[in-house]
Every structure is written in structure tokens, then in C-alpha cells.
Image: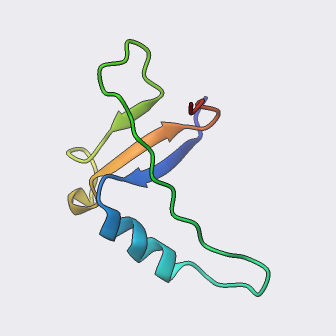
Amino acid sequence: MNSFLSTSRDRYVALAFTQTTRRRDNARTILFEIEINPRLRTKAFAEIGNASYYKEENEILIMLGALFR
């Protein structure tokens, strides 16, 4: 799979993205808070903050189709 959900560990970075998203009358922005256990054997996510051009975003990529419980 080569599609990912881009997220941030930093709540303020995430909120900033909700403000810059183009608004439409019938659309709303939503901020999800997701808890991830980094000790899981099978990981559907990758912390890429150090590899990202924008290191201050503290980005985490989550595989689309990952299950949340």
C-alpha cells in the first residue's frame, strides 16, 4: 500500500492545518486525537519527523486502512 494519512504529534500544528484548509459550505474540519502504542509488534505507522523537510511538524504517517480500536 502506498497511501498514507499524514498526521502530527503536535496539536497546534494539526490545528493550523484545519485553518488553512479550503472551506466549503457543506464541509467541516475535524481534529482526531489518536493514541498509538509504539511498542506494538505490527506497526501501521511511521514517525518521519527526522526525515521530513518540515521537522517542526513532528509528522507521523499512518497507513490508510489501519484499524483503530
Please identify the quarter of the rendering in which residue 55 is found: bottom left
Q: In this view, does 8 lie to the left or right of 23?
A: left
| Residue name at image x 37 percent, y 45 percent | 60
Q: How many labels does the image show?
A: 0
Please identify the quarter of the rendering in which residue 56 is found: bottom left
Q: Is residue 68 left or right of residue 39?
A: right
Q: In which quarter of the image is the N terminus?
A: top right
Residue 35: x and y in percent read: 40, 40
| Residue name at image x 31 percent, y 70 percent | 12
Toward the viewer: 32 or 21? Answer: 32
Above or below, 17 against 38 in this view is below
Residue 39: x and y in percent read: 29, 20
Q: Is residue 6 left or right of residue 68?
A: left
Please identify the quarter of the rendering in which residue 15 is found: bottom left
Q: In this view, does 21 lie to the left or right of 35?
A: right
Residue 28: x and y in percent read: 67, 75
| Residue name at image x 43 percent, y 42 percent | 61
In the current view of this chain or complex, which residue is farthest to the right?
A: 26
Residue 22: x and y in percent read: 61, 82
Above or below, 55 against 41 in this view is below
In the current view of this chain or complex, which residue is farthest to the front?
A: 69
Q: Quadrant of the C terminus?
A: top right
| Residue name at image x 20 percent, y 45 percent | 50
